Image: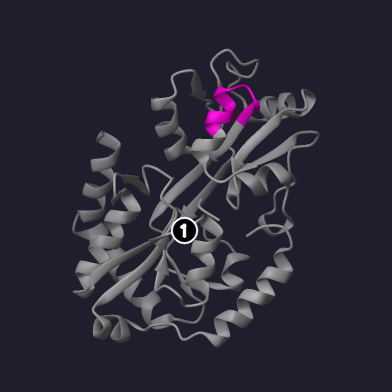
C-alpha cells in the first residue's frame, strides 16, 4: 500500500526532524512496558480491516504473533495511512504495519524490516466498461490515456504515485488522465460503481476482496507493478528491525506465516 503526499521533500525534512526528537522504543523497552503499540489503517482487507470492534487481517495476525513472540500485549491504533507512517517515524508507536511498500524514499524517514509479502498493482473497472476486456498492459495504459480516464486510488499509496507520476518511485504517471484521491480503497470502488470515475488502481489482494463484494466490478489481468510489503518503525531503530527480521524468518520457517495467508485467502 500501503503509503506521503504533495510536498514530499518538505514533509520528509519535517519527519526527519521529528524522528530525531523522539525516542524509539527498543525491544527491551517494549518488553518492560508490556505493550507493543502499532499503527495501521484498517480499510485494506485482507491485510487490515475491522469486524465490529475487532481488528482482523493478515497484518493484524502478524502483529499478534509478534506480540506473542515478545511476550507482550498488542495495542492497535487505527489511523489514516499517512498518519500511521508518521506515527512510526516519530516513535509515537513502536511500528506500523499496513500493507506498506518499502522503497528508498520512505527509507529516508523510516526503518524497515525484511519484506514479508510480494504485492502488485492492478486496475479495477466496471464489467461493462470499454476497458473490461483488455488483457495487455500497454494497451490498457494507452486506452486510459486516450480516453482521458478518471482514475481513483487510495491517498498516499503506490496507486497514487503510479497514476500521478513520481520521480522517487520511478513512475512517469498515466498521461492525460485525471487522478482522483480517496481516503481508502473502498471509497474509490464505490465511486467507480457509481460512475464517478472510470477505473481504480490498487494492490491486487484488496482489489480481489473489493470485487467479491461489488459484483459489477472486475479486476483486469495486467500487472502494473511488483512490490514488497515490510513492517516500518523509526529510522535507526536497528534493535527492533533485527528482532522483526528474526521473527519473520521464524514464522516463514515454522509454517505460521503460510497458515495466516491461507486463512484469509480461503475465506
Q: Quadrant of residue 31?
A: bottom left
Magenta stretch: residue 114 in it? no
Which residue sits at x=30%, y=37%? 265
Task: Indicate the position of residue 227 as horizontal and vertical percent values.
Answer: 52, 50
- Direction from residue 8 to residue 210 in the image, left or right: left
Q: Is residue 165 above or below residue 108?
A: above
The secondary element bearing badge 1 is classed as loop
Q: Tell me how many marks there are.
A: 1
Q: Quadrant of the C terminus?
A: top left
Q: Is residue 125 visible?
A: no
- The residue nearer to you, when weighing 50 against 133, is 50
- The spot of residue 39 in percent (x, y) is 42, 63
Q: Residue furthest front?
A: 53
- The colour scheme applied to this rendered structure is one colour
Asked if the magenta segment contains residue 195, the reply would be yes
**Could you say which quadrant of the image residue 107 lies in?**
bottom right
90 vs 245, left or right, is: right
Residue 238 visible from this viewpoint: yes
Which residue is pictured at 18% across the width and 74% down the height? 71
Q: Which x, y percent locates residue 92?
A: 45, 75
Q: Is residue 69 left or right of residue 127?
A: left
Residue drawn at point x = 72 percent, y = 23 percent: 143
Image height check: is 136 above or below 267? above
Which of the 4 image quadrants contains residue 192?
top right
Tell me if 144 is positioned left or right of 40 in this view: right
Q: Which residue is mark 1?
A: 79
Q: Which residues are magenta?
A: 189-199
Can you give x and y, in whole percent of width and height, for residue 113 in the image? 42, 68
Q: Residues within 10 Å of mark 1 (few under 14, many from 20)?
A: some
Amino acid at each position: 500500500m500501503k503509503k506521503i503526499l504533495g510536498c514530499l521533500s518538505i514533509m520528509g525534512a519535517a519527519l526527519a526532524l521529528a524522528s530525531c526528537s523522539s525516542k524509539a522504543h527498543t525491544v527491551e523497552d517494549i518488553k518492560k512496558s508490556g505493550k507493543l503499540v502499532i499503527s495501521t489503517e484498517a480499510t485494506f482487507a485482507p491485510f487490515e480491516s475491522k469486524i465490529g470492534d475487532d481488528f482482523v487481517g493478515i497484518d493484524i495476525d502478524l502483529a499478534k504473533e509478534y506480540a506473542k513472540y515478545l511476550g507482550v500485549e498488542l495495542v492497535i491504533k487505527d489511523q489514516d495511512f499517512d498518519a500511521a507512517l508518521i506515527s512510526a517515524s516519530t516513535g509515537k508507536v513502536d511500528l506500523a504495519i499496513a500493507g506498506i511498500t518499502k522503497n528508498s524514499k520512505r527509507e529516508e524517514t523510516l526503518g524497515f524490516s525484511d519484506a514479508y509479502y510480494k504485492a502488485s498493482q492492478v486496475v479495477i473497472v466496471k464489467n461493462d466498461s470499454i476497458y473490461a476486456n483488455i488483457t495487455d498492459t500497454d494497451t490498457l495504459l494507452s486506452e486510459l490515456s486516450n480516453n482521458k480516464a478518471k482514475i481513483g486510488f487510495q491517498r498516499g499509496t503506490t496507486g497514487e504515485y503510479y497514476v500521478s507520476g513520481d520521480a522517487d518511485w520511478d513512475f512517469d504517471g498515466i498521461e492525460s488522465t485525471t487522478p482522483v484521491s480517496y481516503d481508502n480503497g473502498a471509497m474509490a470502488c464505490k465511486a467507480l460503481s457509481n460512475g464517478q470515475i472510470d477505473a481504480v488502481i490498487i494492490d491486487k489482494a484488496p482489489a480481489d476482496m473489493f470485487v467479491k463484494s461489488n459484483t459489477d466490478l472486475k479486476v483486469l489481468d495486467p500487472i502494473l507493478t511488483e512490490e514488497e510489503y515490510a513492517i516500518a518503525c523509526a529510522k535507526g531503530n536497528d534493535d527492533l528491525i533485527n528482532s522483526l527480521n528474526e521473527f519473520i524468518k521464524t514464522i516463514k520457517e515454522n509454517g505460521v506465516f503460510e497458515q495466516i495467508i491461507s486463512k484469509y485467502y480461503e475465506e
